[in-house]
């Protein structure tokens, strides 16, 4: 398998998850703006959407979208590591992954396009509201989706890393801050950060 990624982008969550699953894979950096992989390939020939992550499964199939990649990797390479399909715990995982994807990830995205003034203040307030939902839920659960670590935690860790770029203060969310520290300490996370040149 080969993961196509951009350092620090949402593909970091897939990189972490591949490490967690203990599978053998290679990783190739993509310059999204140039549309080229590190080896010079046209990235849109690999993923027509031009976005990371993309996972070449090695059998002629390329899987895209991080939420799909992370669940497929864990279900196929580490059976039983995720809650069973059909259980409430699995629905909670889907709930968490979708909330991070549609509410938190997408709330960070506008900061990468140079928001300023009132528009930036409004987006910061929206981000705070989205994160407060997670902060409140962490009062009764250890991880994002419940009582066990899942790819939702890797995804949440990845997107909340962007607070530094946005000038957003996560310190107002002590449970989130504690969760991020716990996720960051995982060997699979440290390995992915080092591989992408992001380790402190």
Image (cartoon, helix red, strand yellow):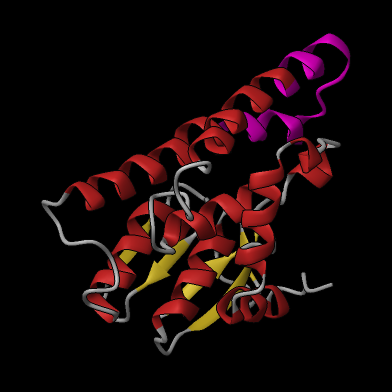
- In the displayed orientation, state which residue is furthest to the top: 118
- In the displayed orientation, state which residue is furthest to the left: 86
**Relative to residue 67, is residue 127 drawn left or right?**
right
Residue 71 seen from this side: yes
**Residue at the location (73% across, 46% down)?**
162
Q: Label the magenta part by its dominant secondary structure.
A: helix
- In the displayed orientation, state which residue is furthest to the front: 140
Q: In the image, residue 169 lies at what x, y percent? A: 82, 37
Q: In the image, residue 91 lies at what x, y percent? A: 23, 45
* Magenta span of residues: 106-124
Numbered-mark total: 0
**Residue at the location (60% across, 29% down)?**
132
Examine the rendered structure and indicate whether residue 20 appears above or below residue 107.
Answer: below
**Residue at the location (65% across, 34% down)?**
109
Q: In the image, residue 10 lies at what x, y percent? A: 57, 53
Q: Is residue 119 magenta?
A: yes
């Amino acid at each position: 398998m080969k993961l196509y990624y951009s350092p620090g982008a949402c593909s970091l969550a897939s990189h972490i998850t591949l490490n967690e699953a203990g599978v053998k894979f290679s990783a190739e950096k993509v310059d999204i703006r140039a549309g080229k992989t590190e080896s010079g390939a046209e990235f849109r020939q690999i993923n027509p959407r031009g976005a990371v992550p993309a996972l070449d499964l090695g059998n002629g199939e390329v899987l895209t979208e991080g939420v799909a990649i992370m669940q497929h990797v864990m279900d196929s390479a580490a059976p039983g590591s995720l809650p069973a399909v059909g259980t409430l715990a699995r629905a909670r995982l889907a709930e968490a992954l979708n909330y991070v994807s549609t509410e938190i990830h997408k709330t960070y995205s506008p900061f990468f396009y140079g928001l300023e003034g009132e528009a930036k203040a409004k987006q910061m307030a929206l981000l705070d509201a989205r994160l407060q939902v997670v902060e409140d839920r962490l009062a009764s659960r250890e991880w994002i989706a419940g009582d066990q670590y899942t790819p939702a935690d890797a995804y949440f860790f990845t997107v909340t890393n962007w607070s530094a770029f946005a000038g957003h203060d996560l310190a107002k969310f002590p449970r989130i801050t504690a969760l991020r520290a716990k996720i960051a300490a995982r060997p699979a996370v440290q390995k992915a950060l080092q591989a992408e040149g992001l380790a402190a």
